[in-house]
Image (cartoon, grey):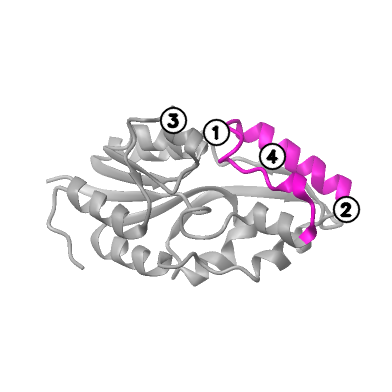
Amino acid sequence: MAMEVACFDLEGVFVPEIWIAVAERTGVDDLRLTTRDVADYDTLMRHRLSVLDREGLRLADIQSVIATLSPLPGAREFLGWARRNFQVVVLSDTFYDFAAPLMAQLDQPVLFCHNLEIDEDGRIAGYRLRLPNQKFHAVKAFQDLQFSVLAAGDSYNDTAMLCQADAGFLINPPPVVVEEFPQLPVARSFDELREFMVAASSRTLVD
């Protein structure tokens, strides 16, 4: 029986979309775009960095917004269930500079994400990807290590890992992603996602 790893996206799955929260707090609507809207991550990040420069926003401004955020309702409980039944890894295209306080509220699951480049004035000067398309490559690496992988996410940048996984699920995705990836089952709640994972697992899971 294969050992199973559960891989999850972070924003929009367990925690609010950070950039939308920043847009709402600062009133800068140009920061509302996320991977639910833009398929190409580099295009999205270049847009964000340009807007931050234009508005004079620094890392500290974003971190002050993040400090006010909490996990989505039911996220901590669902993640606790997942960790009792699987080896869990959160695969995210956020940055360690952003995610730390949110991960503490989720009891510190393993997180693979990226790094920001911060200049001496606290400006976000750029970013360093751990690896292009890291979510897909992480899932493939786990499979090469003889793990069976279940995965869940909500956005364009999750679809490669969901399609590569032995069982991949969308959770609360935008309609355009559902339309473009009709082969992926869609969960509308953590309870439904849990049902999908129980059905996909080769083992008897605990509550």
Question: Residue 82 is drawn in which quadrant?
Answer: bottom left
Mark 2 or mark 3, whichever is nearer to me: 3
Identify which residue, 65 or 3, lies in the foreground.
65
> Is residue 103 visible to the viewer in this orientation of the structure?
yes
Please identify the quadrant where the C terminus is shown.
bottom left
Q: Amino acid at mark 2?
A: Gly
The secondary structure that most of the magenta stretch takes on is: helix
The residue that label 2 is drawn on is: 56
Whichever of labels 4 and 2 marks the residue nearer the N terminus, that label is: 4
Q: Position of residue 180 (x, y in %)?
A: 44, 28
Whether residue 201 appears in magenta in the rendering, the answer is no
The residue that label 3 is drawn on is: 179
Q: Amino acid at mark 4?
A: Met
The residue drawn where x is 41% and y is 40% is 138
The residue drawn where x is 60% and y is 40% is 129
The residue that label 1 is drawn on is: 132
Q: Which mark is residue 45?
A: 4
- Marks 4 and 2 sit apart, C-alpha to C-alpha, by 16 Å
Q: Which mark is residue 21?
A: none
Q: Which segment is the magenta one?
A: 26-55
Q: Position of residue 27 (x, y in %)?
A: 79, 56
Whichever of labels 3 and 1 marks the residue nearer the N terminus, that label is: 1
Question: Residue 60 is drawn in which quadrant?
Answer: bottom right
Identify which residue, 89 or 190, lies in the foreground.
190
Whichever of labels 2 and 1 marks the residue nearer the N terminus, that label is: 2
Q: Position of residue 8 (x, y in %)?
A: 41, 50
